[in-house]
Image (tube, coloured by chain):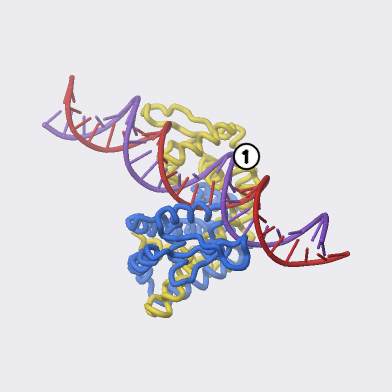
Chain colours: A yellow, B blue, C red, D purple
Amino acid sequence: MTHRNAQEYTSEQARKEAWLPLMQELVRCYQAFSRHSARHIKSLGLTPSQFDVIATLGNTEGMNFKMLGQETLITKGTLTGIIDRLEAKGLVRRVNSGQDRRSTLIQLTEQGQRLFEKVFPEHIRYLSTSFERLDSEQQTQLRRLLRGLRNHFF
Amino acid sequence: MTHRNAQEYTSEQARKEAWLPLMQELVRCYQAFSRHSARHIKSLGLTPSQFDVIATLGNTEGMNFKMLGQETLITKGTLTGIIDRLEAKGLVRRVNSGQDRRSTLIQLTEQGQRLFEKVFPEHIRYLSTSFERLDSEQQTQLRRLLRGLRNHFF
DNA sequence: GTAATATAGTTCTAATACGAACTATTGTCA
DNA sequence: TGACAATAGTTCGTATTAGAACTATATTAC
Protein backbone atom coordinates (compact mmCIF):
# COMPACT_ATOMS: atom_id res chain seq x y z
CA MET A 1 0.00 0.00 0.00
CA THR A 2 2.98 2.27 0.25
CA HIS A 3 3.78 2.10 -3.44
CA ARG A 4 7.25 3.27 -4.18
CA ASN A 5 5.98 3.49 -7.69
CA ALA A 6 3.41 6.03 -6.77
CA GLN A 7 6.18 8.60 -6.59
CA GLU A 8 7.01 8.17 -10.24
CA TYR A 9 3.41 7.95 -11.21
CA THR A 10 2.80 11.26 -9.49
CA SER A 11 5.54 13.12 -11.21
CA GLU A 12 5.28 11.54 -14.62
CA GLN A 13 1.68 10.84 -15.35
CA ALA A 14 -0.63 12.60 -13.01
CA ARG A 15 0.85 15.61 -11.36
CA LYS A 16 -2.60 16.54 -10.24
CA GLU A 17 -2.86 13.53 -7.95
CA ALA A 18 -1.27 15.15 -4.96
CA TRP A 19 -3.21 12.89 -2.63
CA LEU A 20 -0.87 9.93 -3.16
CA PRO A 21 1.65 11.08 -0.55
CA LEU A 22 -1.23 11.52 1.85
CA MET A 23 -2.32 7.95 1.27
CA GLN A 24 1.20 6.70 1.85
CA GLU A 25 1.50 8.71 5.02
CA LEU A 26 -1.80 7.35 6.32
CA VAL A 27 -0.55 3.82 5.81
CA ARG A 28 2.85 4.47 7.31
CA CYS A 29 1.49 6.31 10.30
CA TYR A 30 -1.01 3.59 11.08
CA GLN A 31 1.57 0.87 10.69
CA ALA A 32 4.01 2.69 12.92
CA PHE A 33 1.33 3.10 15.55
CA SER A 34 0.18 -0.45 15.20
CA ARG A 35 3.64 -1.93 15.62
CA HIS A 36 4.46 0.40 18.47
CA SER A 37 1.31 -0.67 20.25
CA ALA A 38 1.78 -4.36 19.44
CA ARG A 39 5.27 -4.36 20.89
CA HIS A 40 3.95 -3.42 24.30
CA ILE A 41 0.91 -5.66 24.15
CA LYS A 42 3.02 -8.69 23.37
CA SER A 43 5.20 -7.93 26.36
CA LEU A 44 2.00 -8.27 28.40
CA GLY A 45 1.46 -11.77 27.04
CA LEU A 46 -1.42 -10.96 24.69
CA THR A 47 -1.92 -10.51 20.98
CA PRO A 48 -3.35 -7.19 19.77
CA SER A 49 -6.71 -8.76 19.01
CA GLN A 50 -6.85 -10.48 22.37
CA PHE A 51 -6.05 -7.20 24.09
CA ASP A 52 -8.74 -5.53 22.06
CA VAL A 53 -11.33 -8.00 23.25
CA ILE A 54 -10.23 -7.77 26.89
CA ALA A 55 -10.29 -3.98 26.72
CA THR A 56 -13.75 -4.01 25.19
CA LEU A 57 -15.21 -6.44 27.71
CA GLY A 58 -13.74 -4.62 30.71
CA ASN A 59 -16.27 -2.82 32.92
CA THR A 60 -19.08 -4.66 31.20
CA GLU A 61 -21.58 -7.36 32.10
CA GLY A 62 -20.56 -9.19 28.96
CA MET A 63 -21.33 -8.97 25.30
CA ASN A 64 -22.46 -11.32 22.55
CA PHE A 65 -20.46 -12.00 19.41
CA LYS A 66 -22.36 -9.55 17.33
CA MET A 67 -21.81 -6.61 19.64
CA LEU A 68 -18.22 -7.56 20.30
CA GLY A 69 -17.58 -7.72 16.59
CA GLN A 70 -19.07 -4.29 16.04
CA GLU A 71 -16.95 -2.75 18.76
CA THR A 72 -13.67 -4.36 17.80
CA LEU A 73 -14.20 -4.46 14.02
CA ILE A 74 -13.35 -8.16 14.05
CA THR A 75 -15.51 -10.42 11.92
CA LYS A 76 -17.44 -13.16 13.65
CA GLY A 77 -15.51 -16.01 12.08
CA THR A 78 -12.27 -14.59 13.39
CA LEU A 79 -13.81 -13.81 16.73
CA THR A 80 -14.68 -17.43 17.36
CA GLY A 81 -11.02 -18.40 17.31
CA ILE A 82 -9.92 -15.46 19.44
CA ILE A 83 -12.53 -16.23 22.08
CA ASP A 84 -11.53 -19.91 21.96
CA ARG A 85 -7.98 -19.01 22.87
CA LEU A 86 -8.96 -16.48 25.52
CA GLU A 87 -11.24 -19.08 27.03
CA ALA A 88 -8.43 -21.63 27.02
CA LYS A 89 -6.32 -19.09 28.91
CA GLY A 90 -9.10 -18.73 31.45
CA LEU A 91 -9.61 -15.04 30.72
CA VAL A 92 -13.17 -15.12 29.35
CA ARG A 93 -16.12 -17.52 29.48
CA ARG A 94 -19.08 -18.26 27.25
CA VAL A 95 -22.45 -18.07 28.97
CA ASN A 96 -25.82 -18.99 27.53
CA SER A 97 -27.58 -15.70 27.21
CA GLY A 98 -31.14 -15.78 28.48
CA GLN A 99 -33.74 -15.43 25.77
CA ASP A 100 -32.24 -16.18 22.41
CA ARG A 101 -30.68 -19.61 22.45
CA ARG A 102 -28.60 -18.80 19.40
CA SER A 103 -26.78 -16.07 21.26
CA THR A 104 -23.78 -16.44 23.55
CA LEU A 105 -22.67 -13.97 26.17
CA ILE A 106 -18.95 -13.52 26.58
CA GLN A 107 -17.72 -12.29 29.93
CA LEU A 108 -14.40 -11.68 31.58
CA THR A 109 -13.58 -14.22 34.28
CA GLU A 110 -12.18 -13.00 37.59
CA GLN A 111 -8.75 -13.63 36.19
CA GLY A 112 -9.66 -11.74 33.03
CA GLN A 113 -10.98 -8.86 35.10
CA ARG A 114 -7.75 -8.70 37.10
CA LEU A 115 -5.74 -8.75 33.89
CA PHE A 116 -7.89 -5.98 32.43
CA GLU A 117 -7.38 -3.80 35.49
CA LYS A 118 -3.66 -4.29 35.24
CA VAL A 119 -2.90 -4.06 31.53
CA PHE A 120 -5.44 -1.55 30.27
CA PRO A 121 -4.15 1.44 32.26
CA GLU A 122 -0.59 0.31 31.64
CA HIS A 123 -1.10 0.28 27.92
CA ILE A 124 -2.87 3.61 27.90
CA ARG A 125 0.05 5.09 29.78
CA TYR A 126 2.46 3.52 27.34
CA LEU A 127 0.68 5.02 24.35
CA SER A 128 0.18 8.40 25.97
CA THR A 129 3.85 9.24 25.80
CA SER A 130 3.60 9.22 22.02
CA PHE A 131 0.29 10.92 21.50
CA GLU A 132 0.79 13.64 24.06
CA ARG A 133 3.66 15.08 22.11
CA LEU A 134 1.13 16.63 19.79
CA ASP A 135 -0.41 19.66 21.39
CA SER A 136 -4.11 19.50 21.93
CA GLU A 137 -4.90 21.78 19.05
CA GLN A 138 -3.06 19.54 16.62
CA GLN A 139 -4.80 16.52 18.10
CA THR A 140 -8.19 18.04 17.52
CA GLN A 141 -7.34 19.10 14.02
CA LEU A 142 -5.90 15.74 13.10
CA ARG A 143 -8.90 13.93 14.43
CA ARG A 144 -11.26 16.14 12.50
CA LEU A 145 -9.37 15.69 9.26
CA LEU A 146 -9.20 11.93 9.68
CA ARG A 147 -12.90 11.77 10.32
CA GLY A 148 -13.52 13.83 7.22
CA LEU A 149 -11.40 11.52 5.14
CA ARG A 150 -12.99 8.42 6.60
CA ASN A 151 -16.43 9.57 5.59
CA HIS A 152 -15.32 9.43 1.98
CA PHE A 153 -14.59 5.71 2.05
CA PHE A 154 -17.97 4.19 1.37
CA MET B 1 -7.70 -1.04 19.10
CA THR B 2 -10.90 0.90 19.03
CA HIS B 3 -11.67 0.34 22.69
CA ARG B 4 -15.22 1.12 23.50
CA ASN B 5 -13.96 1.19 27.02
CA ALA B 6 -11.67 4.04 26.27
CA GLN B 7 -14.68 6.33 26.27
CA GLU B 8 -15.44 5.59 29.88
CA TYR B 9 -11.82 5.66 30.82
CA THR B 10 -11.55 9.10 29.31
CA SER B 11 -14.44 10.60 31.12
CA GLU B 12 -14.03 8.86 34.45
CA GLN B 13 -10.39 8.48 35.16
CA ALA B 14 -8.25 10.59 32.96
CA ARG B 15 -10.00 13.54 31.49
CA LYS B 16 -6.65 14.85 30.46
CA GLU B 17 -6.13 12.03 27.98
CA ALA B 18 -7.89 13.71 25.12
CA TRP B 19 -5.75 11.82 22.65
CA LEU B 20 -7.79 8.64 22.95
CA PRO B 21 -10.42 9.72 20.43
CA LEU B 22 -7.61 10.61 18.08
CA MET B 23 -6.18 7.13 18.39
CA GLN B 24 -9.57 5.60 17.72
CA GLU B 25 -10.07 7.78 14.70
CA LEU B 26 -6.65 6.86 13.32
CA VAL B 27 -7.57 3.19 13.55
CA ARG B 28 -11.03 3.61 12.09
CA CYS B 29 -9.86 5.79 9.25
CA TYR B 30 -7.11 3.39 8.28
CA GLN B 31 -9.42 0.40 8.46
CA ALA B 32 -12.03 2.14 6.36
CA PHE B 33 -9.41 3.00 3.78
CA SER B 34 -7.92 -0.44 3.87
CA ARG B 35 -11.24 -2.20 3.32
CA HIS B 36 -12.27 0.23 0.64
CA SER B 37 -9.02 -0.40 -1.18
CA ALA B 38 -9.12 -4.15 -0.68
CA ARG B 39 -12.61 -4.40 -2.13
CA HIS B 40 -11.39 -3.07 -5.45
CA ILE B 41 -8.13 -5.02 -5.45
CA LYS B 42 -9.95 -8.29 -4.92
CA SER B 43 -12.17 -7.51 -7.87
CA LEU B 44 -8.96 -7.38 -9.90
CA GLY B 45 -8.07 -10.93 -8.80
CA LEU B 46 -5.29 -10.01 -6.38
CA THR B 47 -4.85 -9.79 -2.63
CA PRO B 48 -3.78 -6.44 -1.17
CA SER B 49 -0.27 -7.72 -0.50
CA GLN B 50 0.06 -9.14 -3.97
CA PHE B 51 -1.06 -5.85 -5.46
CA ASP B 52 1.43 -4.07 -3.27
CA VAL B 53 4.27 -6.17 -4.62
CA ILE B 54 3.17 -5.78 -8.23
CA ALA B 55 2.85 -2.03 -7.79
CA THR B 56 6.28 -1.81 -6.22
CA LEU B 57 7.99 -3.89 -8.89
CA GLY B 58 6.38 -2.02 -11.77
CA ASN B 59 8.71 0.22 -13.80
CA THR B 60 11.70 -1.46 -12.18
CA GLU B 61 14.48 -3.80 -13.25
CA GLY B 62 13.61 -5.97 -10.28
CA MET B 63 14.33 -5.95 -6.59
CA ASN B 64 15.69 -8.37 -4.02
CA PHE B 65 13.74 -9.49 -0.97
CA LYS B 66 15.38 -7.02 1.32
CA MET B 67 14.54 -3.99 -0.78
CA LEU B 68 11.08 -5.25 -1.55
CA GLY B 69 10.45 -5.77 2.14
CA GLN B 70 11.56 -2.25 2.95
CA GLU B 71 9.30 -0.74 0.33
CA THR B 72 6.20 -2.74 1.13
CA LEU B 73 6.72 -3.08 4.89
CA ILE B 74 6.22 -6.83 4.57
CA THR B 75 8.60 -9.01 6.58
CA LYS B 76 10.82 -11.39 4.67
CA GLY B 77 9.20 -14.54 5.99
CA THR B 78 5.83 -13.38 4.74
CA LEU B 79 7.30 -12.18 1.48
CA THR B 80 8.56 -15.66 0.61
CA GLY B 81 5.00 -16.97 0.53
CA ILE B 82 3.64 -14.02 -1.39
CA ILE B 83 6.33 -14.31 -4.05
CA ASP B 84 5.70 -18.06 -4.22
CA ARG B 85 2.08 -17.46 -5.10
CA LEU B 86 2.81 -14.65 -7.55
CA GLU B 87 5.35 -16.89 -9.21
CA ALA B 88 2.81 -19.69 -9.43
CA LYS B 89 0.46 -17.24 -11.16
CA GLY B 90 3.22 -16.40 -13.63
CA LEU B 91 3.34 -12.75 -12.60
CA VAL B 92 6.88 -12.58 -11.21
CA ARG B 93 10.05 -14.63 -11.49
CA ARG B 94 13.07 -15.23 -9.27
CA VAL B 95 16.42 -14.56 -10.93
CA ASN B 96 19.86 -15.24 -9.53
CA SER B 97 21.26 -11.80 -8.91
CA GLY B 98 24.81 -11.44 -10.15
CA GLN B 99 27.33 -10.99 -7.39
CA ASP B 100 25.89 -12.14 -4.11
CA ARG B 101 24.74 -15.71 -4.44
CA ARG B 102 22.56 -15.37 -1.35
CA SER B 103 20.46 -12.72 -3.02
CA THR B 104 17.53 -13.23 -5.37
CA LEU B 105 16.20 -10.70 -7.83
CA ILE B 106 12.45 -10.61 -8.24
CA GLN B 107 11.12 -9.26 -11.52
CA LEU B 108 7.76 -8.87 -13.16
CA THR B 109 7.23 -11.26 -16.05
CA GLU B 110 5.72 -9.94 -19.27
CA GLN B 111 2.37 -11.03 -17.98
CA GLY B 112 3.07 -9.29 -14.68
CA GLN B 113 4.08 -6.14 -16.51
CA ARG B 114 0.87 -6.16 -18.52
CA LEU B 115 -1.15 -6.67 -15.35
CA PHE B 116 0.69 -3.81 -13.67
CA GLU B 117 -0.02 -1.48 -16.54
CA LYS B 118 -3.67 -2.37 -16.37
CA VAL B 119 -4.47 -2.49 -12.66
CA PHE B 120 -2.20 0.15 -11.19
CA PRO B 121 -3.78 3.14 -12.97
CA GLU B 122 -7.21 1.62 -12.48
CA HIS B 123 -6.71 1.36 -8.76
CA ILE B 124 -5.27 4.84 -8.47
CA ARG B 125 -8.32 6.16 -10.27
CA TYR B 126 -10.58 4.18 -7.96
CA LEU B 127 -8.95 5.62 -4.86
CA SER B 128 -8.78 9.14 -6.21
CA THR B 129 -12.52 9.61 -6.01
CA SER B 130 -12.26 9.35 -2.23
CA PHE B 131 -9.13 11.32 -1.57
CA GLU B 132 -9.88 14.15 -3.92
CA ARG B 133 -12.89 15.14 -1.89
CA LEU B 134 -10.51 16.75 0.54
CA ASP B 135 -9.29 20.05 -0.83
CA SER B 136 -5.57 20.26 -1.37
CA GLU B 137 -4.99 22.40 1.67
CA GLN B 138 -6.61 19.83 3.92
CA GLN B 139 -4.60 17.10 2.23
CA THR B 140 -1.36 18.89 2.92
CA GLN B 141 -2.30 19.61 6.49
CA LEU B 142 -3.41 16.08 7.17
CA ARG B 143 -0.25 14.68 5.71
CA ARG B 144 1.89 16.97 7.82
CA LEU B 145 0.06 16.09 11.01
CA LEU B 146 0.25 12.37 10.32
CA ARG B 147 3.95 12.63 9.68
CA GLY B 148 4.39 14.50 12.93
CA LEU B 149 2.50 11.85 14.83
CA ARG B 150 4.37 9.02 13.16
CA ASN B 151 7.69 10.45 14.26
CA HIS B 152 6.61 9.92 17.85
CA PHE B 153 6.26 6.17 17.49
CA PHE B 154 9.77 4.93 18.12
C1' DG C 1 -49.37 -23.20 11.92
C1' DT C 2 -46.14 -23.98 8.56
C1' DA C 3 -43.03 -22.50 4.86
C1' DA C 4 -39.76 -18.97 3.85
C1' DT C 5 -36.52 -16.04 5.70
C1' DA C 6 -33.32 -13.99 8.83
C1' DT C 7 -29.99 -14.23 12.47
C1' DA C 8 -26.09 -16.11 15.85
C1' DG C 9 -22.16 -18.73 16.06
C1' DT C 10 -19.17 -22.32 14.21
C1' DT C 11 -16.35 -24.42 10.74
C1' DC C 12 -13.60 -24.28 6.74
C1' DT C 13 -10.21 -22.54 3.22
C1' DA C 14 -6.71 -19.56 1.52
C1' DA C 15 -3.65 -15.89 2.50
C1' DT C 16 -1.32 -12.89 5.58
C1' DA C 17 1.62 -11.70 9.49
C1' DC C 18 5.40 -11.95 12.85
C1' DG C 19 9.33 -13.83 14.81
C1' DA C 20 12.53 -17.54 15.71
C1' DA C 21 15.34 -21.10 13.97
C1' DC C 22 17.78 -22.77 9.99
C1' DT C 23 20.88 -22.96 5.62
C1' DA C 24 23.92 -20.96 2.55
C1' DT C 25 26.91 -17.44 1.53
C1' DT C 26 29.70 -13.41 2.44
C1' DG C 27 32.46 -10.26 5.28
C1' DT C 28 35.72 -9.32 9.17
C1' DC C 29 39.63 -9.62 11.66
C1' DA C 30 43.57 -11.41 13.90
C1' DT D 1 43.69 -18.45 6.35
C1' DG D 2 40.56 -19.75 9.64
C1' DA D 3 37.23 -18.89 13.36
C1' DC D 4 33.35 -15.88 13.79
C1' DA D 5 30.01 -12.62 12.94
C1' DA D 6 26.70 -10.73 9.61
C1' DT D 7 23.40 -11.19 5.86
C1' DA D 8 19.76 -13.24 2.33
C1' DG D 9 16.11 -16.28 1.94
C1' DT D 10 13.53 -20.24 3.47
C1' DT D 11 10.97 -22.87 6.79
C1' DC D 12 8.21 -23.40 10.76
C1' DG D 13 4.72 -22.45 14.55
C1' DT D 14 1.06 -19.72 16.15
C1' DA D 15 -2.45 -16.34 15.48
C1' DT D 16 -5.16 -13.38 12.65
C1' DT D 17 -8.06 -12.17 8.77
C1' DA D 18 -12.05 -12.27 5.40
C1' DG D 19 -15.58 -14.59 3.51
C1' DA D 20 -18.39 -18.61 2.25
C1' DA D 21 -20.86 -22.59 3.71
C1' DC D 22 -23.13 -24.78 7.55
C1' DT D 23 -26.15 -25.65 11.88
C1' DA D 24 -29.37 -24.26 15.09
C1' DT D 25 -32.71 -21.20 16.46
C1' DA D 26 -35.95 -17.35 15.88
C1' DT D 27 -39.03 -14.41 13.13
C1' DT D 28 -42.15 -13.33 9.41
C1' DA D 29 -45.76 -13.96 6.24
C1' DC D 30 -49.51 -16.12 4.51
Q: Is residue A80 visible?
A: yes
Amino acid type, residue under disc 1 in the picture: Leu
The 10 Å Cα crowd at callout 1, few under 14, some 14 to 19, many 20 or more, is some
* Chain hosting mark 1: A
Q: Nearer the viewer, residue B103 or A69?
A: B103
State the image coordinates of residue A20 (x, y, percent, origin top left): 43, 71
x 46%, y 40%: residue: A79
- From the viewer's side, name the closer residue of B127 and A116: B127
- What residue lies at 47% left-to-right and 60% top-to-bottom? B93
Indicate the position of residue D20 as horizontal and vertical percent values: 32, 41
Location of residue A66 (image quadrant): top left
Quadrant of res A129: bottom right
Residue A122's spot in the image, x, y percent? 64, 49
The quadrant in which residue A125 appears is bottom right
Q: Judge by depth and name the residue closer to the eye, B93 or A66.
A: B93
- Identify whether C24 is placed above or below A63: below
Residue A29 visible? The answer is: no
- What SS does tag 1 mark? helix
The percent coordinates of residue C17 (x first, y second) are 53, 52
Q: Quadrant of the C terminus of chain B?
A: bottom right
The residue located at (59%, 37%) in the rendering is A113
Q: Which residue is mark 1?
A: A115
